[in-house]
Amino acid sequence: MSFLLRWLRRGNAEQEMSDELRDHIERQTDANIAAGMPRDEARRQALMQFGGAEAVKEGCREQRSGFWLETLFSDVRYGVRMMARSPGFTSVAILTLALGIGANTAIFSVVNGVLLNPLPFPQPEQLVSLSESKPNFATGSISYLNFRDWQRNNHTFSSMAISRPISFSLTGSGEAEQLQAELLSSDYFSLLGVKPVIGRMFAPGEDEVGGAPIVLISAGLWKRKFGSSPEVLGRTIRLDGSGFTIVGVIPADFDLSTRSFRNSEVYVPIGQWKNNFLLNRGAGLGIHGIGRLKPGVSIEQARADMDEVTRNLIAAYPDSDKGIGATVRPLKQDMLGEVRPLLLLLLGAVCFVLLIACVNVANLLLARSTSRAREFAIRAALGAGKGRLIRQLLTESILLGFAGGGLGLLLAVWATRVALQHLPVTLPRAAGVSIDARALLFTTAISVGVGIVFGLAPALKSLRPVLQVTLNESGRGGSGTRHRTQSIFVVVEMALALVLLAGAGLMVRTLARLWSQDPGFNPRNVLTFNLSPPPSLMNSNAETVRAFSRELSRRIAATPGVEAVSMTWAALPMSGDDEDVFWLDGHPKPASQNDMNWAVKYVVDPDYLKAMEIRLRRGRFFTPQDNEHAPSVAVIDDALARKYFGGDDPIGKRIRVKENEEMGDGTTEIVGVVDHVNQWGLASDAQNLQAQIYLPAMQMPDGFTVLVSYGTSAVVRYAGSAPGIIDSIRGTSRNMNSEQVVYGEQTMDEIISDSISDRKFSMVLLGTFAALALLLSSIGIYGVISYLIGERTHEIGIRMALGAQRKDVLTLVLSEGVRLTLLGAAIGIAAALGLTRLMGNLLYGVSATDPLTFAAVPVVLLGVAMLACYIPARRAMRVDPMTALRYE
């Protein structure tokens, strides 16, 4: 309160201080006169004795409490006035900073939402993911029976749970529709600390096979189908033709996405899954788990505990569990996958843009400080110390930083919205991306930080000129030191811009290589979709299911625009995988399933090769005669042929497929060899299981075939547009049975595009950052060359008066730009050769030191720099020698 009163009365205090100072000077003047000095000399000596009135006042003010706040207010007011006096300079500086700060805030909001924010569950550090480690897969699916043994026998987990994505056909509530669903063990939600909106969660034991058919529904489905009525509890909905009683509603804000869990509309106990293989200890079936560690238990202790559990299971069940271990990883790490290095790389890249923006504004401030040199000299002559002047200049630069930060925040809000629409489909936790309090704090911090960074060097440089020289100059004269500093800044900008250009160039080359990659099939005009059969088909025998599949294929094939169709019951390239094990006929049967040979399994119809346009290398593909009554046959890919048959022709050879072991004599004849297809993506296929085997759908065992009654997939080669053909197929399906649902349609081009979405996202952002860097760098070199021409106008006039031609002036100016650009490019190349190695995981078919990229990028940089230099160079060419000779 006392400080506030003093601040309100500061005018009186200033007047009192002036009066007192004047009194002291007059007394000293009188004393000097009494000593015999003339009056004018006596006053001059009195003033000299006090060292300058303003300096004395400043010293007195510094002794007052709260003076720093008064000074701050004064500096801010003066800084605002100076910004208002130079609207052009202020606008350019603020916009430059806004671009850098806005881009940084937008990327930070993504990093914050995905990487930094903790999982939205109690004690998230205790949560881990659980998978089986097995041949070819470090994080494979868990068999249901093994999970039950893990639950019983571990000593380090307070709870474990499993999930498996599925879909159900909802009927009896209007038009039939397909619902995303999850099969869960009872304690899945309680492990995560999730509470129902109404009702209850699953109780222990309700997830056992044979339990009561109950279901939890999402808040979205509750609102859409039941109007958020609390009377929904106890009501029955029909899923895949069976009645399920609603016991609870999951909150709308629940959000989790893992390799086997997605936010769904219905959640069903896993014991309700009508899958004949659920109680097969050797079948994983796409099940994965999560766990919560006991308090004080480390993840290393949990891994050691699970190692002991799995060793005991191997001893008890050697046939199915040999080679099976447990993979325990922090849940957040498992969710993030490989996205962490990608986001950190992008954050580092956007920091380069901010640095270029800072350097650009620092250059602007240096150029502006030339016109203020007299002002600083006069203020110094009046007694202002260096610290006081530096504080004033830093206040002005921080004001620019805040203004740029405010505008940058608005740009970041817009950019974040745009980014959310284009984030890779594989990016985890994208729903958590927003401009939150942490992002606001980040923006504030970098606004202050960049204000200090770009303001400090110009502030220090502005105070170096000798006072007398500055006062004697007309205000136009320049400083060689200042020019060198500006040149250094431009070199730094060029170096940073080249690093970003190199990164963007490498990503462009990577995408070009990926798009030119042959995936082993022709993705153009190929449509994939899922189909849920009518509930009346469910629980049918194998013959009925086969008849349905044949009729469905016939009807879809007759749909206008369909050129070829095949049902697919197992793996589909880049969409979903399924594996089987086999061994060569004539060789001893391996001791356990995991000692057998693994292959990706495709269960398809005879027209699959025509639909996908996969090249047949040898032999034949399936025909309609390869049905349930014919001998078992298979087609393999060239990778399996090379690995297991070497140079021998595999046609006519026999293998024993585990799935078909009980059929006929247990052997399967190889009748054809096809090209290998990229199952795991364009870029990562070589890192995973390569061998592939095709089996005819009609020859699958009855136990496998009946599962098709719960859902199947199809691939269609079509003519025309994808939306038109899917509408026609839906019409065909409805005409066949109104309770059939076609869903999940995607073109194969879309699937391939999604598989490289992270690289496309990186390329777009790095390209955007590189373009910003190039723009800001070109502005920087334009400013420096313009300043240089202004300083050398007199020299240019003399040259032209002595006979220099316009082209000589052009060469003089451009040579300065070339010198700065080439020096920056050399430094940038050296830096890029080291930094681009951090992009190794994103590159494909291109090395981090790709010669073509590193040859092209300096050329682009030099070309843009020359365009930026040409404008001031043309102005220099038009200098009138007579005017220049009179120029001061």
Image: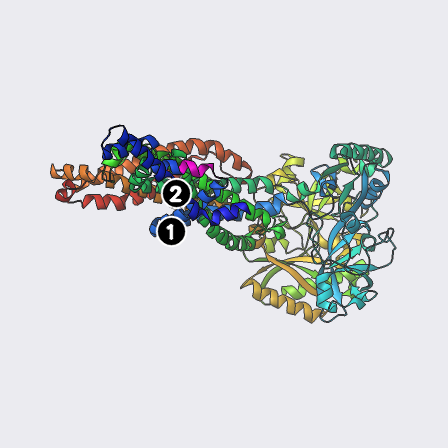
Q: Nearer the viewer, residue 248 or 533?
A: 248
| Magenta-colored segment: predominant secondary structure | helix
Q: How many marks?
A: 2
Residue 382 in the figure: left or right of residue 185: left
What residue did someone put label 1 on? 91
Q: Can see residue 261?
A: yes
Residue 147 horizontal side relative to residue 848, left or right: right
Q: Nearer the viewer, residue 621 or 636?
A: 636
Number of the label disc, if any, that sits on residue 726 = none
- In this rendering, the answer to whether 547 lies above or below 335 is below
- Badge 1: how crowded within 10 Å, few (<14), some, or many (20+)? some
Could you say whether the residue bearing mark 2 is in a helix, strand or loop? helix
> Image check: 86 left or right of 593?
left
Q: From mark 1 to mark 2, how far is it between C-alphas?
A: 11 Å
Residue, disc 2: 361
Q: Nearer the viewer, residue 804 or 136?
A: 804
Q: Secondary structure at mark 1?
A: helix
Q: Quadrant of the C terminus?
A: top left
Q: x%, y% of residue 595?
A: 76, 35
Tell whether position 61 is magenta.
yes
| Residue 291, quarter of the rendered image | top right
For the view shown, which residue lies furthest in the front direction? Answer: 34
1 or 2: tag closer to the N-terminus: 1
Please report the residue visible at 84 percent of the width from the left and 44 percent of the height from the top. Answer: 148
* The residue stretch that appears in magenta: 58-64
Disc 1 marks a residue whose amino acid type is Ser
